[in-house]
Image (tube, rainbow, N blue to C red):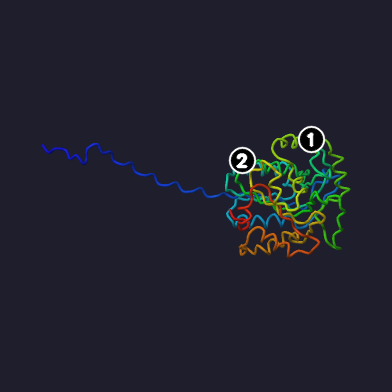
Amino acid sequence: MIPPNPAFQNKVPPMPKKPASPSRKPTGVSLHIGLNSVRPATYGGWDGPLAACEFDAKDLAVIARSQGMKSRVLLTRRATRAAVLKGIRSAAGTLKAGDLFLLSYSGHGGQMPDTNGDEPDRKDETWCLFDGQLIDDELYFELSKFAAGVRILVLSDSCHSGSVARAMPLAPPPPGQRSRLMPDFVGRRTYAEHQVFYDRIQKEVARAARSRFSDPDEALAQVGAAAHAIGLVGKFNPAVILISGCQDNQTSMDGEHNGAFTEQLLKVWNHGAFRGTYPDFHARIRAGLPASQSPNLFVLGNAKAFLAQTPFTV
């Protein structure tokens, strides 16, 4: 009988190593909103006719899909409050750290009285959706629900006045051009007819947000550079970049195929040939527009790395 070789005694064969799991690829989702009109019954008989907002939404969706995003487009009658909130909440419930959410809006911007006391000038900004306005407090509260590390890009081609200069009178648009601003008298009438509804929204959002973060518009109004608002917002986990169509005391112009802001954005993007950062992108867009319409760049959350990326990168 051959004695066992001591070299092989009490040896346990090594377990095969598990292959390293591939790193998760980021996911991109986009929601594009474009309204060429609104429902008159909801806006005191005003239908807010515009020409190019639907084109804006469709053209930005083309960019999103070319970058690998799963996109949804809501045009005019389909761009209701319920549909927009559902789209944002769906993305918030799906996306994880490293993912990208692109939200674009083309339509009228409006204002209404601030009833929850979070605005220094006592006015809230709105997006005019088909069956009612989406208040800025609502929008930022919904964005705050995204997971930490999610990147959110908001493009707003509308008259979206900031808190600093809301009390200033806006200059009329050049002859023959349409601005994307709901007239003040329409805003007052719309609010008066639906005051209970809008006041309730503001109270509910304020109650839910009070323990989480201060109002982003208030934060932006208190600093010279929007990037500094990060330190004022508090528990705002996603990284948000907002590029809006004009400055506080200006209006965004409509067009025949695209709004002025979106038209210049598409030119700078140049079918994906642009390779700069978000600040570069904003600067190039701004340089191509007249002094009467100068887009703004805001950030919320820890957006330093996000700003350094090429726009629309998933």
**Residue 143 tag number:** none
- Say what amino acid the circle numbered 1 marks: Arg
Determine the CA span between mark 2 and mark 1.
25 Å
What x and y, as percent, mark residue 125?
Answer: 79, 47
Q: Is residue 197 above or below residue 267?
A: above
Residue 50: % across, % down = 79, 55
- Give the class, few, some or many, for how many residues have Cα within 10 Å of label 2's Cα (few <14, many ≥20): few
Q: Which residue is mark 2?
A: 93
- Kind of residue at badge 2: Gly
Residue 163 image point, x, y percent = 80, 48
Q: Quadrant of residue 16?
A: top left
Disc 2 is placed on an element classified as helix
**Front residue of 165 and 244:** 165
Q: 10 Å neighbourhood of mark 1: few (<14), some, or many (≥20)?
A: few
Dividing the picture into quadrants, the one containing residue 146 is top right
If the image is split into quadrants, where does the N terminus sit? top left
Q: Secondary structure at mark 1?
A: helix
Q: Which residue is mark 1?
A: 200
Q: Position of residue 284 (x, y in %)?
A: 69, 63
Q: Would you say the residues marked 2 and 1 are in contact, meaning their CB atoms lie under 8 Å apart?
A: no
Number of numbered discs overlaid on the protein picture: 2
Whether residue 196 is situated above or below residue 272 in the rendered picture = above
Q: Which numbered disc, 2 or 1, marks the residue that appears first in the sequence?
A: 2
